Amino acid sequence: MRRCICILAFLLTACASLLLDPQDPRLNTRAPKQFRVRFATSQGDFVVEVHRDWAPIGADRFYNLVRHHFFNGQRFFRVRQGVFAQFGIPGDPRLAQAWRHITMADDPPQQPNARGTVAYAFTTANTRATQIFINLADNRSYDTQGFAPFGMVISGMDIADRLYSGYGETSGGGMRAGHQDTLFAGGNAWLNREFPRLDYIRSARLEW
């Protein structure tokens, strides 16, 4: 048992070190055509099914981040009840800053922002990085704004609906509001102190 714990600790440390170098080729591999990710959260589990043909650039980024445990421990820092739930800023400020400006080219939207779909947040053209939201409603008005879903919650949508929404925009806000500097600088330590009721991701792992 002790040996297994030591091996796990070593692997997690290795993943964390790798993530601090977003340009590493191991973080930029091509995703499968379709794959699933199980999010174990403080409310329970939900599963996202990703379709690479919906948004290949975004799907590739998501696949690599999940493979290397990028989302583990993150808070759902922006939840508007019945609208969306947003995550994607690491709790470790070093990691958050390393990825903040690692942007991607846009994917043309191929699917509507229907309830249950997941897409990247962005400010202007070609500024998607790591922040992702789950559509908790049919947000089809987002379609013309360029938000490109790359997957959908196929089980556990009731879990997503239950994510704590009481803080609204105050616990980080959206990218376009320009109020995220404190979150990037303080990470989970700041969120735990100021917004202790936020739900969080225990782990996000690939399922086949």
Image: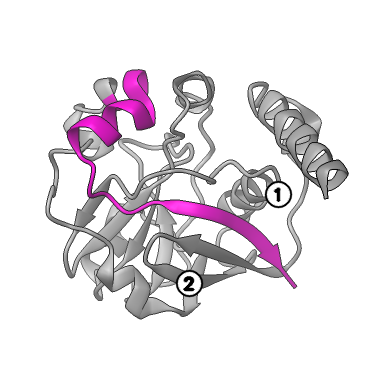
Residue 150 visible to the viewer:
no
Left or right of 169? Residue 204 is right
Q: Position of residue 116 (x, y in %)?
A: 38, 74
Q: Please, is residue 72 above or below residue 110 in the view?
A: above
Magenta includes 184?
A: yes
Identity of the residue drawn at 27% across and 72% down: 161
Identity of the residue drawn at 29% across and 58% down: 85
Q: CA gap, disc 2 to disc 1?
A: 17 Å
Q: Position of residue 108 (x, y in %)?
A: 48, 56
Q: Nearer the viewer, residue 112 or 168?
A: 168
Q: Position of residue 197 (x, y in %)?
A: 22, 49
Quadrant in which the C terminus is drawn:
bottom right
- For residue 21, which quarter of the picture? top right
Numbered range of the magenta stretch: 183-208
Identity of the residue drawn at 54% across and 46% down: 72
Task: Determine crowd level at label 2: few under 14, some 14-19, many 20+ residues with C-alpha closer than 10 A.
Answer: some
Left or right of 73? Residue 182 is left
Which residue of the protein is positioned furthest toward the front in this rendering?
A: 2
Callout 2–callout 1 Cβ contact below 8 Å: no
- For residue 65, which quarter of the picture? top right
Give, as a three-letter code, the residue at label 2.
Phe
Identity of the residue drawn at 29% across and 44% down: 77
* Dot 2 or dot 1, earlier in sequence: 2
Q: Which residue is mark 1?
A: 67
Give, as a three-letter code, the residue at label 1.
Arg
Magenta includes 193?
A: yes
Q: Which residue is mark 2?
A: 46
